[in-house]
Structure formats: C-alpha cells, structure tokens
Amino acid sequence: MAEDLKIIQGTKAEQYRHLLPQIQGLLEGESDFIANMANTCAALKEQFGWLWVGFYLVKKDELVLGPFQGPVACTRIKKGRGVCGHCWEHEKTIVVEDVHSFPGHIACSSLSRSEIVVPLMQRGQLIGVLDVDSEKLQDFDDTDRQFLEEVVGMLLAKVA
Ligand code: SME
C-alpha cells in the first residue's frame, strides 16, 4: 500500500481525478471500515485543505461522530437536525453554499461557511454520512457531489 499521497495543483476535477486512484490504493488490501474512513478523511483534507472532513455513523436514533480530520466537532446529531440530519432524512447529497442561510445548520466551527454532506447508503439503508466543511463561501458544487459520491461508493464497496 502506498502511504505517501501525491498532492497536485489544478482544477477541482483534476485534483479529484488524481486523488481518487490514490484513495483506491489506500483502501486496497484493508477491509476495516474505520481505518478506511480515517485514511479517506486524511487524503481529502490533505489534497483540498478544507476546514473539516469527517464521517458520522448511524447508531440507534442518532448520527455519532466517526473518523474525521479538523477541529473538534459535535458528537451526536438527531435525524432532521442540521445539514447532516437533513441528509439522513432525505437520503441524498446536500450542498450548502452558505451555511448561514441553511435553517438549523449546526455550527461546530464558527469558521465554516459552506458545506457538503453525502449519504452512505448500504443495501437501501443510510448507515452514515460524509460531511465536509469549508471556510470559503460556495466552495462546493456538482463536481464535489459527483466525486465525493464516488469516494463514498469506493468505501462502501469494501464493506459488502
Ligand atoms: N454542520 C453540521 C454539523 C457537523 S459539523 O459541521 C462537523 C450540520 O449542520 O449538520
């Protein structure tokens, strides 16, 4: 397994296209879901320098904080609450251009300005979410949605 990540400059799509095979390489040969989520967060944070990248996992009736990179964060989120809880309720990727305009947004960090949350769907059930926060307004768009959904697909393919 290659433990060194090669970081590149370029358009957002170029950065993702270069990073995704490297994430795939990190996942190869490791079946542990926690380890794979942890390295996925690290790889995304290293390439893009976002404020916060992490996972929340469904445990009973809450999302509970999982592996992440960035400042300390809230540990539990109810269904329907905040962007993550909204993603859980609607089971689709949510792109928030300005977190201050999202009713009920949970501000784990006052530095966060925009956010994307991608559902982790396994056999039709939402088992968690990937949450990414940026200090820049409107930092996420359809390109992020497309590639981050691909990243989540790669991770979930390993848990069968
Ligand atoms: N902002 C999220 C909460 C999680 S933190 O951003 C890490 C939300 O509104 O659900």
Image (tube, rainbow, N blue to C red):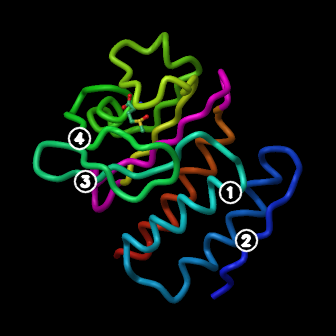
Sort mark 1 into few (<14), some (14-19) or many (20+) by Cα contacts within 10 Å. some
Which of the two marks, 3 or 4, is nearer to us in this view? 4
Residue contact between numbered discs 2 and 1, judged by CB atoms under 8 Å: yes
- The amino acid type of the residue labelled 2 equals Leu
Q: Which mark is residue 5?
A: 2
Q: Which residues are magenta?
A: 121-139
Sort mark 2 into few (<14), some (14-19) or many (20+) by Cα contacts within 10 Å. some
Residue 38 image point, x, y percent: 47, 65
- The amino acid type of the residue labelled 3 equals Gln
Residue contact between numbered discs 2 and 3, judged by CB atoms under 8 Å: no
- The amino acid type of the residue labelled 4 equals Arg
> Which quarter of the rendered picture does the C terminus lie within?
bottom left
Mark 2 and mark 1 lie on one chain; the one further toward the N terminus is 2
Q: Residue drawn 38% across and 21% down?
A: 105
Which of the two marks, 2 or 3, is nearer to us in this view? 2
Q: Secondary structure at mark 4?
A: strand
Residue 12 image point, x, y percent: 78, 44
Mark 1 and mark 4 lie on one chain; the one further toward the N terminus is 1
* Residue placed under numbered mark 1 in the picture: 46
Which of the two marks, 3 or 1, is nearer to us in this view? 1
Mark 2 and mark 3 lie on one chain; the one further toward the N terminus is 2
Q: Which mark is residue 125?
A: 3
Q: Secondary structure at mark 3?
A: strand
* Residue placed under numbered mark 4 in the picture: 76
